[in-house]
Image (tube, rainbow, N blue to C red):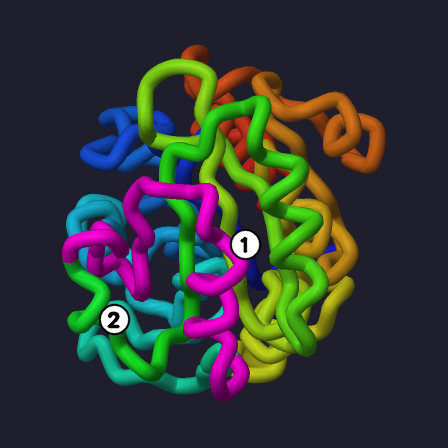
Amino acid sequence: MKYRAIIFDLDGTVVPSVMEGMPSGAVVEAARKAKKLFKLSTASARAIQYCRDIWKALAIEDPCIINGGSQIINPKTEEIIWEQCLPEGAIEEVLKRSKGYTGTFGLNGVFLNIKNDFKKVPKRSNLMVALGVKKENTQSLVQTLSNIPDVAVHILPSWTPGEYWDIHVIHKLATKKHAIEKLIEILRVKKEEVIGVGDGNNDMPLFESVGYKVAMGNSVETLKKAADYVTDSIENEGFAKFIDKILLDNS
């Protein structure tokens, strides 16, 4: 099969899972080589302000998914090509049902301490994130928020050091799966012509939407089991090694 596009996650796949994470020199070089044969798009839960430097380093020009699947954006012009906002009233409902959580919420990458910044909460957002939730409180909060109509709730590793998780709330039609299906349409390629690369449970929708599935060596076991190929870990330049392999296979 001749593949025409590669859609890949950012955190844990091409950059370390920290806010200021950037790709290594080997990953940068691999992406630049891959651009000669493939369309390259990223699919991330990051907001645009945390993607810009990564896109620039990797010379990404094709449309990319941000905010957990709720937006597709042109990385060069930052034009929104497609988006799905949270349902009307969902933000207020999340706040109402999160009374036991006293931390910070992120709304499209803008951080607000709800206790102090309540009046600044926007009425419209694509993605709402409860940041740095203690591990022991995660499941109960997820269960509570999952009862809100027309939303999807996901748990992701937090940038907060220690035993913490982030809880992402998006429209039920704004998951990575919906966005990737739309992105494939925008890229004018077929599902079977697309390679997906990821490392976390939230990359399973990516795997369901592409023709060839690649898991990083540092991936969760469920993703490795679903993969067609498991490359090396991010620490050992797994993404760059896979690109070298696929370039050889596609030549």
Q: Who comes first in sequence, dot 1 or dot 2?
A: 1
Q: Is residue 232 left or right of residue 77?
A: right
Q: Image height check: is 21 above or below 126?
A: above
Q: Amino acid at mark 1?
A: Ile
Q: Quadrant of the C terminus?
A: top right
Which residue is drawn at the image coordinates 24% and 53% (left, top)?
115
Crowd around label 1: few <14 · some 14–19 · many ≥20 (10 Å): many
Q: What residue do we see at 71% from left, 73% from top?
A: 190
Residue 204: x %, y % from top left: 71, 47
**Mark 2: few/some/many CA within 10 Å (<14, 14-19, 20+):** some
Asked if the stretch drawn in magenta spans residue 66, the answer is no
Q: Which residue is mark 1?
A: 6
CB under 8 Å between discs 1 and 2: no
Report the Cα–Cα distance between label 1 and label 2. 36 Å
For badge 2, the amino acid type reads Val
Question: Most extreme residue toward the right, as rendered?
Answer: 225
Could you say which is closer to the camera, residue 217 or residue 86?
86
What residue span does the magenta drawing correspond to? 87-116
Which residue is disc 2 drawn over?
121
Under tag 1, what secondary structure? strand
Relative to 66, is 185 on the left or the right? right
Secondary element under disc 2, as helix, strand or loop, is: loop
- State whether residue 91 appears in this view: yes
Q: Is residue 35 above or below residue 223?
A: below
Residue 121 position within the rendered picture, expressed as x and y whole percent measured from the top left: 25, 71
